[in-house]
Image: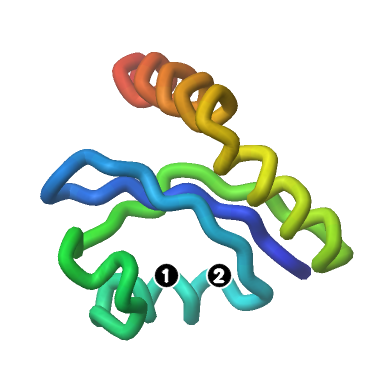
């Protein structure tokens, strides 16, 4: 399986969107500081993910979510979803 995922920084509240094949390993890499772009904003929470059978679809979805308007929309949806818990 391939995954598109969204992380939230507990330090800054920023979102990070990525895709990978092994979600657990990739999540651990982010929190262990092995990813330069996310190192300064650790720790991270995994707040959303989607699973795909094909890497092309996971990558395509990652690019869609990284679009500024889509990222803002996702931020609003997740905000309301997380407040409801």
Identified at 49% across, 51% down, the residue is 17
Q: Residues within 10 Å of mark 1 (few under 14, many from 20)?
A: some
- Residue picked out by circle 1: 27
Q: Quadrant of residue 32?
A: bottom left
Q: Residues within 10 Å of mark 2 (few under 14, many from 20)?
A: some
Residues under labels 1 and 2: Cα distance?
6 Å
Is residue 77 shown left or right of residue 15?
right
Q: Quadrant of residue 31?
A: bottom left
Helix, strand or loop at disc 2? helix
Q: Where does the image place residue 54, in percent across and percent down from the top left?
A: 87, 65
Judge whether 85 appears above or below 1 on screen: above
Q: In front: 83, or 67?
A: 67
Helix, strand or loop at disc 1? helix
Q: Where does the image place residue 42, in percent across and percent down from the top left?
A: 19, 63
Identified at 32% across, 84% down, the residue is 34
- Residue picked out by circle 2: 23
Q: Which residue in the rendered view is the most extreme toward the front? A: 68
Q: Which residue in the rendered view is the most extreme toward the bottom? A: 34
Judge whether 20 appears above or below 4 on screen: below
Identified at 60% across, 39% down, the residue is 65
Is residue 72 shown left or right of residue 67?
left
Quadrant of the snapshot with the C terminus: top left
Q: Where does the image place residue 80, in percent across and percent down from the top left?
A: 39, 15
Is residue 66 shown left or right of residue 83?
right
Is residue 5 shown left or right of residue 10?
right
Q: Quadrant of residue 59?
A: bottom right
Quadrant of the snapshot with the N terminus: bottom right
Identified at 28% across, 42% down, the residue is 14
Proximity of marks 1 and 2: CB atoms separated by less than 8 Å: yes
């Amino acid at each position: 399986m391939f995954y598109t995922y969204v992380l939230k920084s507990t330090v800054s509240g920023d979102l990070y969107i990525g895709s990978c094949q092994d979600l657990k390993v990739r999540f651990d890499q982010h929190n262990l500081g092995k990813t330069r772009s996310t190192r300064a904003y650790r720790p991270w929470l995994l707040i959303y993910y989607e699973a795909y059978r094909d890497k092309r679809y996971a990558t395509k979805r990652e690019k869609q979510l990284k679009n500024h308007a889509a990222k803002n929309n996702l931020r609003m949806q997740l905000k309301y979803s997380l407040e409801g818990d």
